[in-house]
Amino acid sequence: MSDGNLVEVTGLAKQYAIGTGSFGRFGKAAVHAIDGVDLEIRKGETLGLVGESGCGKSTLGRCILRLIEPTSGRVVFDGQDITALRKGALRLLRRHMQIVFQDPFSSLDPRMTVEAAIAQPFDVFPVPEGQSRHQRVLALIDAVGLDASSLQRFPHQFSGGQRQRIAIARALALNPQFIVADEPVSALDVSIRAQILNLLKQLKSRFHLTYLYISHDLSTVKFISDRVAVMYLGKLVEVGPAKAVFAAPRHPYTRALIDAVPVPDPAARNRRQPMKGEPPSPIAPPSGCRFHPRCPHAMPICKETAPPLLMDADGHRVACHLYSPAGTDVVSVDGTTPSSTTVPGSGERLRLIA
Amino acid sequence: MLTEAILSVRDLEVVFETGRGPLRAVNKVSFDIRPGEAYGIVGESGSGKSVTALSILRLLARNARIVSGSVLFKGRDVLGLRDDEMRNLRGKEIAMVFQDPQASFDPVFTIRSQIGEAMSLHRSVSRKEIDANVVSLLRSVGIPEADRRKDQYPHQFSGGMKQRAMSAMALSNSPALIIADEPTTALDVTIQAQMMDLFRDLKERLGVSILLITHDMGLVAEFCDRVSVMYAGSIVETADVHELFKRPRHPYTRALIDSIPRLDREQDQLESIPGRMPSLLELPAFCAFQPRCRFAKPECLEGIPQAKDLDGARVACYRAHAGDL
C-alpha cells in the first residue's frame, strides 16, 4: 500500500444473479455490474469516475463504501482492509466515509427539520471537536452557504440546489476524510449546478477532503477532477490525470465520449460521425475487449483477448490493444500501421512499468 | 424578414390556475420560425419553455388558459381552430417528440401498430402500405432490422431506439414542423449525438423545421440556427446562434453561458448566478432577473423591460439598450 493512497481497490467485482426466460422463471444468469476493477484514490484528490448509464460506476462507488457487498475483490481504506470487516467495525469506519446522492428530493426525510437532518449522525457518533450539536450544525450550515434561519425549516421549503447543500452539510457532519459524490449536480439546473460545483471544490480544500466524483457528465468531471477513470460495461478502460485524459484521450471509447459532448460554441461545431451502436448488455458482454463491437479501430485480437490496463511513466493507464507494450508494432485490421489521424495518441508508444 | 415564417407566435400569455393563485407560466412571448430552420428555445426548469411548446399544439393541462396572443401556422391562427381542425393539424402538419420515450408509447401495442395508427388517422392507407411505410420510416431513423423490429413491443426497444421510433412516428405524415421537447435529456451522451445527427439529417434532407426545447446550451450551439432564451416565463433574448454565443447581450444569457463547465477550456471557478429564479406565482412588476443581475441599477425596478431590437438581436434589458453592460 502506497502512503499517498486513501482508497485502494483490487480486483473488485460485483455480480447480480438474475433469472432468464419469460418473467425470469427459467435459467440463471449474472449481470457483471463491475468486473475486476483495480483503482486507487489518493489522499486529497478528486477522482472523477465517468461512464454512461449501466456501466457500473455507481455500483463501484457503493462497493467501495460497502453499501453494496462486492462479490469478490478487496477494498483498503486508509491502510485497513474493509472488505472483511464485521458490521460493528465497519460502522466505526463509516464516519470517515460519506456519500452525497443525486436526488436531494429523496435523500432528505420530509418530516425532519434541516437541523435534525444534519444532526442525525450525532445520534451514533460524538460531535467532533468538542462542539455542542447546535454549534456544529451552525458551523456546517454556514460552510455550505445557507442561512442559520434555514435550520428550523423542512426540506420541501427549499429548492433542489439548497437541498443538495443540506445533504452536503450532513455528509460533512462527522468530519469525514472521504466523500463519494454520486451525480450530485445532475438533477440541478445549469446556474445552480455551477454553485454546487464551486462549493464542492471549496469545501474540499477547506476540509482536506478526498472525493470520488461519479458522473455521466464529462464537462463537470473535467471541471472538478484531478484524475479521471473512464468505465465501460463494468471495466475501467482508461485512468489518468484529468488534463491528460481530456487533452489526449487514449482509449477509443474515451475519445468517442468526449466527441459526443456538444460544445457550447457554434463556431466549433463538431460534424464528426457519431459513434455507432449502443452499449451491449452486461449480462452477456462481448468477448475480448468489451468495446470492440463499437470500436472504429477494432482488430482481430480485440475480439479474443481482453486488453489489460497498462500504465505509462506518467501514471496514465489504458486498456486497449492499440497500445501494445513498447517495442511491439501496432498494426491495424487491414495490416497497415494506423495513421496518427485515426489512432488517438499514436506516435507515442507506451513505456510500460506494469 | 427574409422568408415568410412557418410558425409565428405573438404576445402569447399562458396562465395556470392553481390553489395558490394564478401562475403566469408564459408572458408575452413572441418568435418566428422559418421554413427549414432549427429554432431553439433554451431555459432552465420553470422558464416556461415547455409550456410555450405545448401551447402551440394546444396540449396544455386543464387548468391552463391561453389568456392572449396568437399562434399562426402557415398563416392560420391555431388558437382559433375547432377541435377537429386542431386534431387534423396535430401529428400531421406539426409533430411532437417528447422527452420520455418510455411514457410516449403504449406498452401493449407493437411499434408497427402505433406508428401505423398515426398514419391512418390522417389519411386512408392500406395495411400493406402501412407495413411498407413503417419499415422505411424505421430505416430512415436508423433502426437496424426494421422489418423484424416493427413487430416488437416498446419494452423490447432501448431508450435510444424508442426515441428513434418516436421520431419515425413524428415523421409519418411528413410534417412541416417538428417540436422536440428535450428529446435527448433521457439518453446517454453517445446516443444523444446519434439522435441529434438524425435530426440534422431530417432537417437537411426533408427541409422540415425543428423547434428544439432544451436546457442544454451545448445542444443549442451545435444544432440551432436561431435561439430564444427564456427566463421566468419571458423571452429575454433572441438572436442568431453565432451572435448569441459570441456576443450575448442579456446579462442572463451571458451568465448562463459562463456558468457551463466546458471541455474546450480550463476553468478554476465557474461563473455562478447567485440566488434562484423567482416563483411564477409571484413574478415581480419589474425585470424578473434583476435580483440576480450584477448589472442591475435602480431603473431596472421600473416596469418590465420589453424585447426590442438591438443590432440584429432582440433583447429585453434596460441596461443592454442603454449600452452600459
Image (cartoon, rainbow, N blue to C red):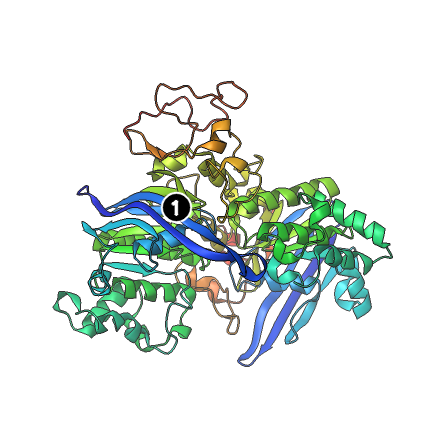
Residue nearest the observer in this picture, B117 or A128: B117
Question: Counting other residues with Cα less than 10 Å from the Cα at mark 1, is it few (<14), some (14-19), or many (20 or more)?
Answer: many
Query: Residue A156, position in %: x, y?
Result: 42, 74
Query: Residue A39, position in %: x, y?
Result: 31, 43
Question: Label 1 belongs to which residue?
Answer: A35
Residue B40 seen in the figure? yes
B240 relative to B75 in the view: left or right: left
> Which residue appears at 41% of the width and 46% of the height?
A50
Q: Is residue B207 above or below residue A159?
A: above
Q: Residue furthest left?
A: A130
> Which residue appears at 12% of the width and 68% of the height?
A130
- Assign a secondary structure to mark 1: strand
Q: Residue furthest bottom?
A: B19
Q: What is the quadrant of residue B152 in the picture?
A: bottom right
Name which residue type carries label 1: Asp
Q: Is residue A23 above or below residue A240?
A: below
Query: Pointer 1 indicates a residue of which chain?
Result: A
Q: Is residue B83 above or below residue A216?
A: below
Q: What is the quadrant of residue A293 in the picture?
A: top right
Residue nearest the observer in this picture, A325 or B137: A325
B77 relative to B298 in the view: left or right: right
B89 relative to A217 in the view: left or right: right
Q: Is residue A188 above or below residue B280?
A: above
